[in-house]
Amino acid sequence: MAGATGDLGFRIAQALLRRGAAVRALVRPGNLKPEATVLRDLGAEVLEVDFGSVTALTTACAGAACVVSALSGLREVIVDGQKRLLDAAVAAGVPRFIPSDFCIDYTKLPEGSNRNLDLRREFNQRLDQAPIQATSVLNGMFTDLLTGQAPVVLFGLGRVLYYGDADQPLDFTTIDNTAEYTAAAALDPSTPRYLRVAGEVASARGLQRAATEATGRPYKLLRAGGLWVLGALIRVARTLAPAPEEVFPAWQGMQYMHNMFSGRPTFAHLDNARYPDIHWTSVREVLAARHA
Ligand SMILES: NC(=O)c1ccc[n+]([C@@H]2O[C@H](COP(=O)([O-])OP(=O)(O)OC[C@H]3O[C@@H](n4cnc5c(N)ncnc54)[C@H](OP(=O)(O)O)[C@@H]3O)[C@@H](O)[C@H]2O)c1
């Protein structure tokens, strides 16, 4: 596993260990994060490796049944870093690779509509050419973001902010559910190229209902405008605060919301049922936990 001491990766590694898998966490030299200690205590092998060296990565990948990447970053990580990891996995004869996608369905989105997803599309084109069985897990938006970064459920104002159509279905999955599912997929040798999951599919109106039920306080809808308004706001935010080195600057989150409200990446079918032991956490449960 690469990225096992990150937020999602740490949870994937733990889910793998719970399922009885042998986990080798590849970490950068000098990684002193408490997550590394926890993984070691839980029985994982934590191996320091130079992510810039395909040779070192190849040695580190030896004997693995599947390489799982939960790396996060921009081009140097998602395209260049994952390419080195892919080359290493192929050289080591690893049969399967799960890239760090974990997002909305970029296969349905036009190039240029979301910088971070363009990088994933680019890496996956290379992955498709490699002699290895690849599986991407697409999970929509992390439900957890509704209680933090994503300005959609406005707790102070009692409003659900949206653009475009209040009935547009949106895909949400918690970080924990994404991790559990990815662990199950990593241990399943017959996964297809893409697996699409959503803990809940909810429109803005559905979020309004969930917020009302979760808090016991009536929420209203707040339509900020059509999608063109959000498009204009993205251009302004990107001009005023480009932050080109940041993985998730404000305008990037807005691109994500624009993509979702456009309906283009909405999953046509879900693969949730593939691993029936997973309990899918609803939006209401996530909002209620914040409220408790
Ligand atoms: N769908 C959604 O709503 C959503 C939201 C957030 C994230 N995600 C996706 O989930 C995935 C994981 O994100 P996260 O939030 O777990 O990220 P994170 O907490 O920042 O963890 C990223 C991991 O990547 C490692 N890493 C970063 N740069 C590296 C490099 N150059 N070489 C080697 N390792 C490197 C980090 O190592 P250290 O531990 O040493 O720092 C860390 O383990 C990403 O694909 C991200 O885009 C999806």
Image: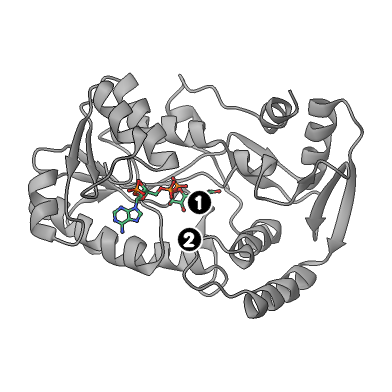
Q: In the image shown, does 127 or 211 lie closer to the viewer?
A: 211
Compared across the picture, whether 208 is left or right of 275 comes to right
Which quarter of the picture shows residue 186?
Answer: top left
Q: In the image, what residue type sits under mark 1?
A: Cys
Residue 213 placed where, x, y %?
82, 27
Q: In the image shown, does 216 or 135 lie closer to the viewer?
A: 216
Q: Secondary structure at mark 1?
A: loop
Placement of 178 over or under 42, stated as above or below: below
Can residue 185 be seen? no
Can residue 34 be seen? yes
**Residue hosting label 1:** 103
Q: In the image shown, does 176 or 10 lie closer to the viewer?
A: 10
| Residue at horizontal 48 percent and vertical 64 percent from the top | 116
Residue 208 placed where, x, y %?
83, 39
**Residue hosting label 2:** 107
Distance from mark 1 CB to nearest ligand 1 atom below 8 Å? yes
Q: In the image, what residue type sits under mark 2?
A: Thr
Q: Secondary structure at mark 2?
A: helix
| Residue at horizontal 87 percent and vertical 25 percent from the top | 216
- Image quarter where the C terminus lies is top right
Calculate the distance from the C-alpha at mark 1 to the C-alpha at mark 2.
Answer: 11 Å
Give the tally of numbered discs.
2
Residue 146 placed where, x, y %?
68, 43
Q: In the image shown, does 75 or 209 lie closer to the viewer?
A: 75
